[in-house]
Amino acid sequence: MTQLEGLVPQHHETISPDLLRDIQQAVLKLPPEYLQNIEAGETYSMCARLNYPICETLRNDNHIDAYCAESSDERTMSHEYGVVTTENGEVIVDAAISQFIYGFNRVFVGTRDDLRKLVLDPRTTIINTGSRDNKPEAFQRIWGDNYHIFRPRSR
């Protein structure tokens, strides 16, 4: 396994190995400079540029129900992340998570509960949000229990 392949988890107790492989392949299709940004933890303001192409690749190349979403919380940070619908529930894919979780220099792939546990973990340092001292609020503002599908802005 190359260092870049380590950007995506190789095992998860509730996510199929096939889906993890497909997500890894979609991530590795990103431009090399974007992969370097993920690895370096330099993803500030890159959420749509990273997550939208991953979802698009999963949809178009793998016929997987994947789309970008953002929190529907009224105080949302307007952070776009990927949601994959599986028979076992939703899988969150966030290649730009390092802009909010210090030192998380890889792609988050897991359930919403996994993400919540990560955010609420006392060892996790939240950055770049006014809610950094209120982790439950930060979770709601950035990812949320409720969300809506993100439509890319017109260029």
Image (cartoon, grey):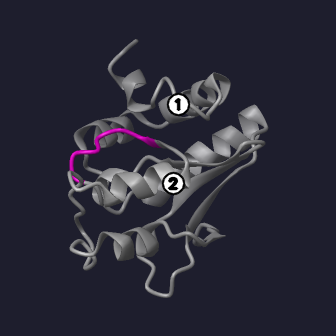
Q: Quadrant of residue 149?
A: bottom right
Look at mark 2 in the image and give the residue it sits on: 113
Left or right: where does residue 3 sit relative to residue 47? left
Q: Is residue 129 above or below residue 92?
A: below
- Magenta stretch: dominant secondary structure: loop
Task: Tell me the residue at 62%/47% (across/down).
Answer: 55
> Is-magenta flag for residue 104?
yes
Q: Residue at x 51, y 70 (%)?
A: 144
Residue lying at 25% horizontally and 49% vertically, measured from the top left? 42
Determine the residue positioned at 43% across, 58% down. 116
Label 1 near label 2: C-beta < 8 Å? Answer: no
Q: Is residue 135 left or right of residue 25?
A: left
How far across and how far down the image is residue 124, in percent?
Answer: 24, 54
Q: Is residue 103 visible?
A: yes
Q: Which residues are magenta?
A: 102-108
Residue 51 shown in magenta: no
Q: Quadrant of the C terminus?
A: bottom right
Residue 50 in view here: no
SS assignment at label 1:
loop
Residue under pointer 1: 12
Disc on the earlier residue, 2 or 1: 1
Residue type at numbered disc 1: His
- Which element carries disc 2, helix, strand or loop? helix
Residue ranking furthest to the top: 1
Q: Position of residue 2 (x, y in %)?
A: 37, 15
Marks 2 and 1 sit apart, C-alpha to C-alpha, by 13 Å
57 and 75: which is toward the camera: 75
Q: Is residue 118 left or right of residue 57?
A: left
Foreground residue, 149 or 117?
117
Q: Quadrant of the N terminus?
A: top left
Residue in the foreground of this view, choosing between 111 and 78:
111
Q: What is the three-letter code of the residue carrying label 2?
A: Asp
